Every structure is written in C-alpha cells, then in structure tokens.
Image (spheres, rainbow, N blue to C red):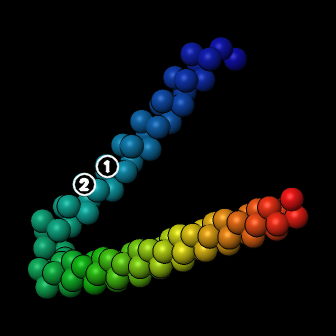
Amino acid sequence: MPRESWTDERLDDLNAKADAGFNRLDQRFDRLEAGAISRAEFDRRFDEVNKRLDRADERVEQIDSRLYSMSRTMVIAAVTMSSSMIAGFGVLAAVLAAKL
C-alpha cells in the first residue's frame, strides 16, 4: 500500500475523531448555556478542581523538599568520601616517605 494512501486514511481518521470530540464539547456548552448545569453546580465543580490543584501543589512541594534533602545528602557524602581518600593518600605518602 502506498504511503500517501495510508497517510490520507490516517488523517481522515484523525479528522473524524477531532470532529467527534468538538461535537461532544459543543453539546456540553449547549447544556451549560441552556441551564442544565446550575451556577451552584458549576461553582462546586470549580471548587473541587481548585482543591485538587492545591493538593497537587502540596505534593510537588513535598517532592521538592525530598529532592533537596537527597541532593544535600549526596553532596555531603561526596565531600566525606573525597576527604577520606585524600587523607588515605596522605597517610600512604607518609608511610612511603618514612620507609625511604
């Protein structure tokens, strides 16, 4: 099957899906404009979304503080290991110097 035919069919499928999605969105707006959803219900749903976003913000802050703590621990570990290696090389050099 030629590539152009496949691409055209795939674009037609995508176009049909997009049209169906916009039709559903139009129906939802029509319901809203017709008053099928009350202002109180509309506000309640937005309040629920805001609460979920607040919880998501809290989780992101927790994750951020954990990542900061982990990176600080990794830096401390790297400095400690480097210091230990330098001290070990210093001791090794002193032992070798004493033997010569």
Which residue matches tag 2? 26
Q: Amino acid at mark 1?
A: Phe
Farthest right residue? 99
Of 82 and 65, nearer the camera is 82
Q: Are marks 2 and 1 in contact (CB under 8 Å)?
A: yes
Relative to 40, is 95 above or below? above
Displayed quadrant of residue 51: bottom left
Residue on which disc 1 sits: 22
Vertical relation: 67 (above or below) 14:
below
**Residue at left 57%, top 16%?**
4
Mark 2–mark 1 Cα distance, whole angstroms, equals 6 Å
Mark 2, residues whose alpha carbon is within 10 Å: few (<14), some, or many (≥20)? few
Q: Which mark is residue 60?
A: none
Tell me what residue is drawn at x 32 percent, y 77 percent: 57
Crowding around mark 1 (Cα neighbors within 10 Å: few <14, some 14 to 19, many 20+) is few
Q: 56 or 60: nearer the eye?
A: 60
**Mark 2, secondary structure of its residue:** helix
Count the marks: how many?
2
- What is the x, y in percent for residue 55? 34, 83
Quadrant of residue 34 in the image?
bottom left
Residue 86's x, y, as percent?
A: 66, 65
Question: Which kind of residue does numbered mark 2 sit on?
Answer: Asp
Find numbered disc 1 in the image and state the secondary structure of the residue it sits on: helix
Residue drawn at (47%, 79%) of the image: 69
Measuring 86% from the left and 59% from the top, which residue is drawn there? 100
Residue 63 visible in the picture: no
Q: Viewer-proximal residue, 91 or 74?
A: 91
